[in-house]
Amino acid sequence: MHLLTANGSSVLLDCGLFQGKRAEAYERNRNFPFDAPTIDAVVLSHAHIDHAGNLPNLVKNGFSGSIFCTSATRDLSNVMLFDSAYVQERDVEYVNKQHKKRKQPPVEPLYTSEDVGQTVDQMLGVRYHQKVEVADGISITFFDAGHVLGSAVTLIEVREQGTTQTIGFSGDLGRKNMPILRDPESLGNPDYWICESTYGARVHEPASGMEDRLFEILTRTIERGGKLIVPAFSVGKTQEFLYVLFTLNDSGRLPPIPIFVDSPLSVNTTEVFKTHPECFDKETLLYLLNNEDPFGFGRLKYVRSVEESKKLNDINEPCVIIASSGMCEAGRILHHLANNVHDPRHTVLVVGFMAEHTLGRRIVERQQQIRIFGEEHALKAEVAIMNSLSAHAGQDELVDYTRTIDKGKLKQMFLVHGELSQAQQLRLKLAEAGYDKIAIPSRGESVELHR
């Protein structure tokens, strides 16, 4: 959530939900550090909840302007935000029952489905490479970020007092040669560069070896008679993982076991993917032209109902279960973990980023005891990590992308969206590449961009 002010206008770059310690997250998400009605426009890089998830709260608090994003981001946000509101409404229902017993005052959800409907109405779809004025003297152009369907790197032009300054905003950067999506596009040579640093200290495994790595993990889990439990974000990660399974199936290497996608949100999201082939790379388009569906091959079963989901716990044979949420903080994945982490036959496969203070991070750290639904569980299942499937650029890829920007023209760089240690390591690597004037802004810090 970054606020740009110029010419008396205020433009918000993304408006995400903070995830972390519950009390801190509740406080930060409910209270904005500005007055919502004073925002003239929002520029949304992509639909992930940590970038789009607090938009309905912004609207609820009086924001009435337009939200500029790609059409694919608008469609994904429609699915994701309604799901977010539904989860909140259900959670509040449960909490208020407990509060009533204790004679405590009721609580309200951050926003409701009605707020989401209004939010989606305020979203305007913009094509890649189409220059659009979003506020007085402020225009944007989207370039493909290659991170998730519809994701964009944004070039912002600010015309003020007869001069023009340009600001590049990465949103989340993707990687080259990943399944389904096109590679990230260069946005040219901005004067200022706001860059994510999620994996600023890590180099990912090469994407080219992901099928072999998954085959190895699957094989040893099946040999133990175990299940492969995969926590996956419904938007992007689930579809990418299915694509890798599809390529294994296509080459005849996928073992003959059932595969379940246990997430209504993933089902709905996958339908959105199918309606936006303009975002696909050549390989995916070729599959579709040949009437092959990477998201719906033979042994794949999408699970919608709670009853069907519960039946998966009765399966005592090898299978793959993909469920959300990606960081294991909510959703059906919690039930699958609670029922399976104690058994060394099974494998928990981590394919995405796990933030600090989440259950997913505790699993990645292989803590011996983990708490699920308030109860302690011994973590005896194998924990396997495939960071080759990460949709975020790694350290080397962030540096390579930044190298496309003319260091002679670049006045300053800001590293955001990453834990401090990650941003600091990325700054060192960028300095080695010849970039200076690299800031790591703290929360709430203001910077004046000089002409």
Image: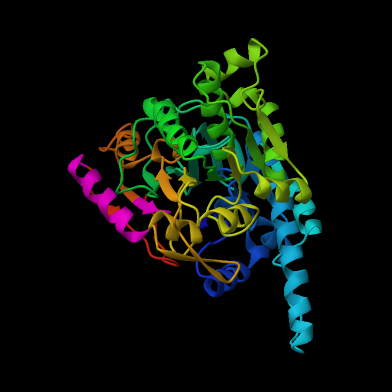
**Along the horizontal axis of the image, is 153 left or right of 294?**
left
Q: Residue at x 72, y 44 (%)?
A: 264
**Along the horizontal axis of the image, is 46 left or right of 196?**
right
Above or below — where is 327 with respect to 236? below
Question: Seen from this angle, which residue lies furthest bottom?
Answer: 103
Q: Position of residue 216 (x, y in %)?
A: 40, 31
Q: Position of residue 306 (x, y in %)?
A: 76, 51
Is residue 8 visible in the rendered image? The answer is: no
Which one is nearer the viewer's eye here, 43 or 211?
211
Q: Residue at x 44, y 29 (%)?
A: 215
Q: Residue at x 40, y 62 (%)?
A: 367
Which one is nearer the viewer's eye here, 391 or 14?
391
Q: Position of residue 142 (x, y in %)?
A: 54, 35
The quadrant where residue 373 appears: bottom right
Question: Seen from this angle, which residue lies furthest top?
Answer: 290
Which one is nearer the viewer's eye here, 105 or 150?
105
Disc tally is 0
- Tell me the chief SS of the magenta region: helix
Above or below — where is 245 with respect to 14? above
Q: Position of residue 114 (x, y in %)?
A: 81, 57
Residue 431 lies in magenta, yes or no? yes
Residue 330 lies in magenta, yes or no? no
The quadrant where residue 380 appears: bottom left
Is residue 422 visible in the rendered image? The answer is: yes
**Along the horizontal axis of the image, is 130 left or right of 170?**
right
Q: Find the magenta span and give its range.
A: 414-434
Render colour scheme: rainbow
Above or below — where is 335 with respect to 346? below
Q: Residue at x 49, y 42 (%)?
A: 156
